[in-house]
Image (cartoon, rainbow, N blue to C red):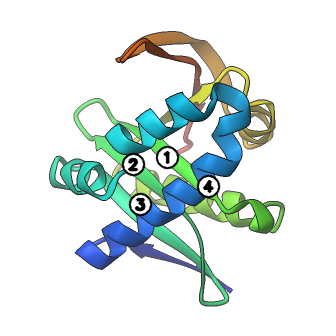
Amino acid sequence: MIKIRKVTTQGDINTAAALAREIWTQHYVPIIGKKQTDYMLANIQSAQAIARQVKEGCLYYLVLEGGRRAGYFSVVPDLKKRSALLSKIYVRQELRGRGLGKAILKFAEKYCLKKKVKLLWLTVNRNNKDSIAFYLRAGFKKSGKITKDIGKGFVMDDYKMEKILDQ
């Protein structure tokens, strides 16, 4: 059984950061290398960074399957623009292909519809072929390319993908 729980405590934040370290190390080192992965973990997905993001209005959620920590995701709503950024969506490698990603998207879309959000968008590394294929199957469309300097000589080289939600 899949359970999604909002991150509300320091313990939850620590769990999300630990999941980030595990998942990102397995998934991103082959795509962007160890140095950039470590840099991004320290600056974007450490417990301190997650706590700051939560304080700034980013909604983090833990995903549990059968009581096990399975992954996490975050949504950044912009209710004035009636849009939301699906900022992170990560599932442990050994649990992929079991419907967790679909459950996360369903949860995020339901949240958006409840808040009258019409556009759900995300960014994904251009070399992250499996994730891009997943998002395309889920109804997202590529809407542009984003290249962003993130410091220390590292660059995020992403596609922006969007999905219009039916109200």
Labels 2 and 3 touching (C-beta < 8 A): yes
Quick check: 119 left or right of 141?
A: left
**Of discs 1 and 3, which sits in the foreground?**
3
Q: Residue furthest front?
A: 35
Residue sitting at 60 percent across and 29 percent down? 124
Crowding around mark 4 (Cα neighbors within 10 Å: few <14, some 14 to 19, many 20+) is some
3D distance between C-alphas at marks 4 and 2: 11 Å
Question: Mark 3 — residue?
Answer: 17
Crowding around mark 2 (Cα neighbors within 10 Å: few <14, some 14 to 19, many 20+) is many
**Residue 166 in view here:** yes
Residue nearest the observer in this picture, 146 or 102? 146
Residue nearest the observer in this picture, 66 or 16? 16
Question: Mark 4 — residue?
Answer: 23
**Res 131 quadrant in image:** top right
Question: Mark 2 — residue?
Answer: 45
**First of labels 4, 2 by sequence position:** 4
Provide residue 105's location: percent of width, then percent of height.
Answer: 60, 54
